[in-house]
Amino acid sequence: MEKKLLITIGRQFGSGGKQIATSLAGMLDIPVYDNELLMEAARSSGLSEELFRCSDEKKRLFSFASAGQSAISEEKLFRIQSEVILSKASQSSAVFVGRAADYVLRDSRPIRIFVSAPLQERIRRVSTRAGISSAKALELIRSKDKSRAAFYDFFTDRSW
């Protein structure tokens, strides 16, 4: 049995974590999974991709409902997404970005990386990438990091 290389990358918003994940996966010639996990979770569950996008790395205090679908809890969405992560990890070596993958894959003992950057660099990166002011970039960074922390803390009982 071939040993798989599993790498998880957590990241602060605007830190460049996605770019690092993509570069690392390219150097190792292994797949990288980020937003693709949402599409796969939707396909495998038969639920709307929008449900997964709305709850992506966010913790809210209500259930989601969509036209023709009954309410579904965030816990169920997280469980479905976790099953997709575990399935991908069982198939081949891979890099997983966010979505508490380090926790989901904890029994597989992945290499766990957390990418951070100085706040001013993050503001510059987000402002340039999104074409927004520094003030708006700071607001977005704070909001995204708060959401990611709440999501991670809730589903893992650990601290982001």
Image (cartoon, grey):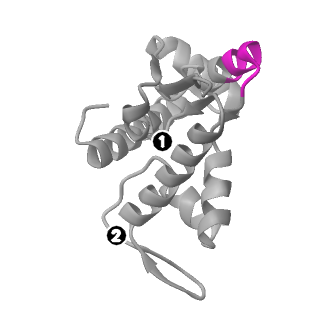
Residue 25 magenta-drawn? yes
Quick one: SS at disc 1?
loop
Give the residue displayed 58% in from the left and 40% down from the top: 90
- Rendering coords of residue 31 (x, y %): 71, 31
Q: Is residue 64 above or below residue 35?
A: below
Under mark 2, the amino acid is Phe
Give the residue displayed 29% in from the left and 42% down from the top: 156
Find disc 2 in the rendering and name its residue.
Answer: 62
- Rendering coords of residue 143 (x, y %): 42, 40
Mark drawn on residue 99: 1
Instruction: Locate residue 102 relative to residue 21 in the image: left or right.
Output: left
Mark 2 Cα shell of 10 Å, populated few (<14), some (14-19), many (≥20): few
* Number of numbered discs on residues: 2
Give the residue displayed 36% in from the left and 46% down from the top: 151
- The quarter of the picture where the N terminus appears is top right
- Rendering coords of residue 94 (x, y %): 63, 29
Mark 1 Cα shell of 10 Å, populated few (<14), some (14-19), many (≥20): many
Stretch in magenta: 22-30
Under mark 1, the amino acid is Arg
Instruction: Locate residue 88 relative to residue 118 in the image: left or right.
Output: right
Place residue 112 in its image quadrant: top left
Quick one: SS at disc 2?
loop
Instruction: Locate residue 107 relative to residue 82 in the image: left or right.
Output: left
